[in-house]
Amino acid sequence: MEVTFLGTGTSQGVPLIGCECPVCQSDDFRDNRLRSSVMISTGEKVFIIDAGPDFRQQMLRERVVHIDAVLITHGHKDHIGGLDDVRAFNYLSGQPIDVYSSKQSATDIRRDLFYVFSAHQYPGIPRINIHQVGNKPFDIQGIEVIPLDISHHFLNILGFRIAGLTYITDCRTIPGHTLSKILNTKILVINALRKTPHISHLSLGQALKIIDKVKPEKAYITHLSHKMGKHEEVSHELPENVELAYDGLRIVTSEQ
């Protein structure tokens, strides 16, 4: 199973528009971050988790010509704002794209892409099939996906576990019943916005405490803001089994 980090930035990306801080002005490519998303390739199946405003750019950069499904963590614009661009895959395959989300996120998608679900559909609109998921494991073309309940401040959202990979973003707290589902996962991807506390996202210290509880073989930090600091400098502060993810990073793990 190969995992590609399509984007590792927060809702505004890095650099921020108009910002002249050292991170936003950095010439290290790892400090340039599109909105957070990953691509999971297992066998011939390709899944995307979240399709934000940079989705088109990410697909072109990685030369993606086929996807089987999009999984949505929640309905904020930086996670669903690029769904219109799945129409390119509609043209290539001749089929709708399956989108898996919670009931609330499905409502958000139908609101934002109202023209897709209109009784009188305009020619050329994207075609998607929304599948609402709860808290029980579900199957996508023979691949088991375990949805994970997490809290994004007062908003309940989803993380996902697929075999040995656990992906969690925009998390502030993880309830006990979810923590038990991810203990000893091989690869843990988890968000950390910055070093100081935030009302709706984990800080770096808080994320490291969760990593220590879960005890994955390897952990990657994603959904970073410019306030985290430069990639090179922060990397030296992390435990041996923890890395800052960056756009374009690829990792390979067994499917167990």
Image (cartoon, grey):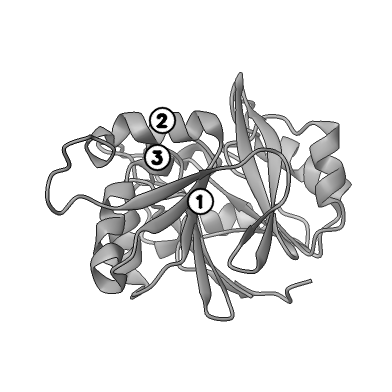
Q: Which residue is drawn at 40% across and 63% down?
A: 29
In this rendering, which labeled residue sits more in front, label 3 or label 2? 2
In this rendering, which labeled residue sits more in front, label 1 or label 3? 3
Q: Quadrant of the C terminus?
A: bottom right
Q: How many residues crowd around disc 1 within 10 Å: few (fewer than 14), some, or many (20 or more)?
A: some
Q: Mark 3 points at which residue?
A: 78
Q: Which amino acid type is marked by label 1? A: Lys
Classify residue 22 as left or right of residue 194: left
The residues bearing labels 1 and 3 have C-alpha atoms spaced at a distance of: 22 Å
Classify residue 218 as left or right of residue 42: right
Classify residue 237 as left or right of residue 155: right
Classify residue 77 as left or right of residue 4: left
Q: Is mark 3 on a helix, strand or loop?
A: helix
Q: What element carries label 2?
A: helix
Q: Mark 2 points at which residue?
A: 108
Q: How many marks?
A: 3
Dot placed on the residue nearer the N-terminal end, 3 or 2: 3
Q: Residue at x 26, y 33 (%)?
A: 114
Q: How many residues crowd around disc 2 within 10 Å: few (fewer than 14), some, or many (20 or more)?
A: some
Dot placed on the residue nearer the N-terminal end, 2 or 1: 2
Q: Quadrant of the N terminus?
A: bottom right
Q: Name the residue under label 1.
A: 230
Instruction: Return the residue found at the far bottom.
Output: 43
Dot placed on the residue nearer the N-terminal end, 1 or 3: 3
Q: Residue at x 31, y 57 (%)?
A: 86
Q: Position of residue 149 (x, y in %)?
A: 70, 36
Q: Which amino acid type is marked by label 2? A: Asp
Q: Which amino acid type is marked by label 3? A: Asp
Which residue is at the front of the view, 155 or 108?
A: 108
